[in-house]
Image (tube, rainbow, N blue to C red):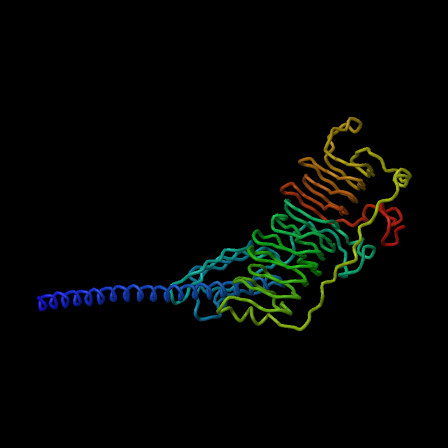
Amino acid sequence: MLHTYYRQTSGITLIEVLLTILLSSVVIGLVTTVLVSSVSLGERTHSQVNLRQEANIVVTELRQKHQGDTYSLCTGNLFSDGRFHAEELTIHNDNTSLSGVPDCENVNPDEPLNVQFTLADDHSQTFTVDTVIEAEQADGGAVVTLDPPEPGGDFGGMLSELFILGSSFSFQGNNVYGDGSSVFIRDPLETSDFNGGAFTGVTNIYIDDAVTLDGGSAGLGSASKPGEIHVNGDLELWGGSRHIYGDVHVNGDFRLKDAHIHGNVYVNGDVELGWTPSFGEDSRIYYTGTLKNPSDYHSYILDRMIKETSVPSVDMPDMFFPNPKADEWYAEHRYNQNVQPENMKLYGSDITIKSYNDNELGRYVDTFTNAVVVSRGDISINSGGLSFSGFLYAPNGKVTFNGSSFEGSVIARDGFHVTSGGTDVTFRSIENYIDDPVDYPFQNGGGIE
């Protein structure tokens, strides 16, 4: 019986050994498969990163060429890194067309340049680019010829260039044309505040809080008259291929991914980089904190990151909010509550301006020019096809515009809000509407009583 028990025990042990060997083989096979797949995935990911970075460099170099004089472009010289080649390539505008075959043409930078190509490497990985490079000059509409104002300063010194002063700015329109102008906003700015070219074309921008732009393509600054952008808080330019013109000063941390940086950035804090930013030829980022970036990051970008013990500080203007004058002053200067198409001077509690049928003029009025509007409450300008040109002042409220086009400048404690899609907003100095500073409808600043 003891012999039988020994034989049974020996048989069970052999089965266990065989099962262990079988399971080990399965586990080793699975682990090997996972490791091979992981290595393959890692290679593909690394390949995609390199393709994206090379494509980014190509587009950046094209953009730089396209901001100068007429130039010669040869498709055979676009890709300097021998690891990559173009499987498909088309570059064209109204006057030029280049295809994938080795070809050279003169390119006129006055027209936008359509660029499409598929970049491939030796691992059969591809990356496709389909973009439009803007023309040399900013798109029309900017009509002022003022020199860019000096950054910093105070209310009186900046008044002639002041476009918007208020707690906030929201824009759902089409374009803002503000070359030579300055905007001062006290509250944070976020992507949801913007649409289209919200701050595109504004020379100097002062935000007395954080700015977070993640998604969309609304840019900052003027391409033709770049000035300075001052952010008294963190700045995030993450998702969205937006253009940033002028030097940027950040009193906080800076996160950068998809934006095109055309000037220098000075960061009194940390910098975090995503995969696809691009830079002008001489653009750099100077920072005082730490630098965070993905592994295997391209040296083309890292070489532009410069660690400093200090950087030029954010220079926020001393922008107190001007107080209104006495009621008697407005009456003496012929302010009233009569809405009219030209040269109106309105004063009241809450003011609303709409298109209307004018029986005396015998026509429908939807255009208002050379207006000065002062409200102790809110100002609302609201009609679908309405066009307005003038200076708006709401020391205790907000200005809301819903119409076709706005031209002028705004001082409003609770901000300027453009709620209509497709609206164009163009800067006009207060000096276009009021000749003598003594007649400005508020107290203090700029030699004003």
Where residue 132 appears, x then y in whole percent?
55, 55
Rendered view: 75 above or below 114: below
Name the residue located 69 percent from the left edge and 42 percent from the top edge. 405
Name the residue located 73 percent from the left edge and 42 percent from the top edge. 399
Q: In which quarter of the image is residue 5?
A: bottom left
Where residue 192 appears, x then y in whole percent?
61, 48
| Residue 264 visible from this viewpoint | no
Q: Is residue 127 left or right of residue 404?
A: left
| Outermost residue to the top | 359
Q: In this view, does 192 lie to the left or right of 42?
A: right
Rendered view: 404 above or below 200: above
| Outermost residue to the front | 1
The quarter of the rendered structure image containing the N terminus is bottom left
Q: How many marks?
A: 0
Q: Quadrant of residue 268?
A: bottom right
Q: Nearer the viewer, residue 135 or 354?
A: 354
| Residue 395 visible from this viewpoint | yes
Name the residue located 71 percent from the left edge and 43 percent from the top edge. 406
Where residue 136 appears, x then y in whole percent?
63, 58
Where residue 43 appears, x then y in whole percent?
40, 66
Rendered view: 272 above or below 170: below
